[in-house]
Amino acid sequence: MTSYYATRNRAIKTTLEAAFGKGKVSVRGSRGSAAGWVTIDIDWTPLDQDQSRRMHAEVKSLLAAAKINLGTCYTDDDCRYEMDKCHLNFNRSRYYSTMRASDGTLLGRQDAWESEWEPVTPKTEPEPDHPMDDFNYVGSRHHY
């Protein structure tokens, strides 16, 4: 007999592999007192932090559309904040942030404060490689 969590984890993997490709998704359920929590690792590299946040939302929307219940927990402080029992991880972003210069050049920088803006070379600008990758790669709304 298969447990509820094992069935849920297989459904998560099947749903996300349809979007990201077979072999690109790892799903692990926690055990013991953390039973019900799930860690999802996706082999996909966002261009910047904004693209990573947008993709987190897209993945959660996909799971909700597939009617997969991730469970609910509340924060320890005063239980005002509700969150799902899911750790979602992508590969590290190529850049901390990106923007388009007024001439159309895509610029990126490695950290928030000290690095300089540098041109993103065509080799590092990702090609759409799965159906969910249909948004603009520019993470910042600033245009200089």
Image (spheres, rainbow, N blue to C red):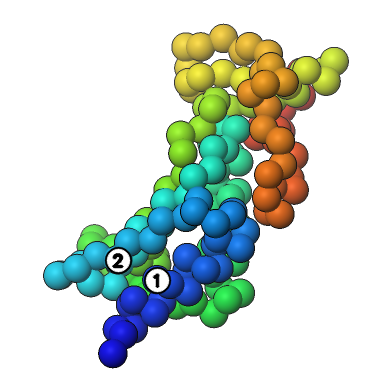
Crowdedness near tag 1: few (<14), some (14–19) or many (≥20) residues, C-alpha within 10 Å: many
**Is the C-beta separation of discs 2 and 1 under 8 Å?**
yes
Q: How many marks?
A: 2
Name the image quarter holding the C terminus: top right
Residue 8: image x %, image y %?
A: 41, 76
Q: Is residue 42 above or below residue 78?
A: above
Q: In which quarter of the view is residue 81 placed?
A: bottom left
Q: Residue at x 51, y 19 (%)?
A: 110
Q: Which residue is mark 1?
A: 9
Residue 112 visible? The answer is yes
Residue type of the residue flagged with mark 2:
Gly
Badge 2 element: strand
Q: Residue at x 55, y 68 (%)?
A: 15
Crowdedness near tag 2: few (<14), some (14–19) or many (≥20) residues, C-alpha within 10 Å: some
Give the CA separation, mark 2 to mark 1: 7 Å
Name the image quarter holding the N terminus: bottom left
In the displayed structure image, the side of residue 95 where residue 118 appears, left or right: right
Residue 106: image x %, image y %?
A: 73, 21
Q: Is residue 54 above or below residue 64?
A: above
Q: Which residue is mark 2?
A: 29
Residue type of the residue flagged with mark 1:
Asn
Q: Residue at x 43, y 72 (%)?
A: 10
Residue 16: image x %, image y %?
A: 54, 62
Viewer-nearest residue: 81 or 98: 98
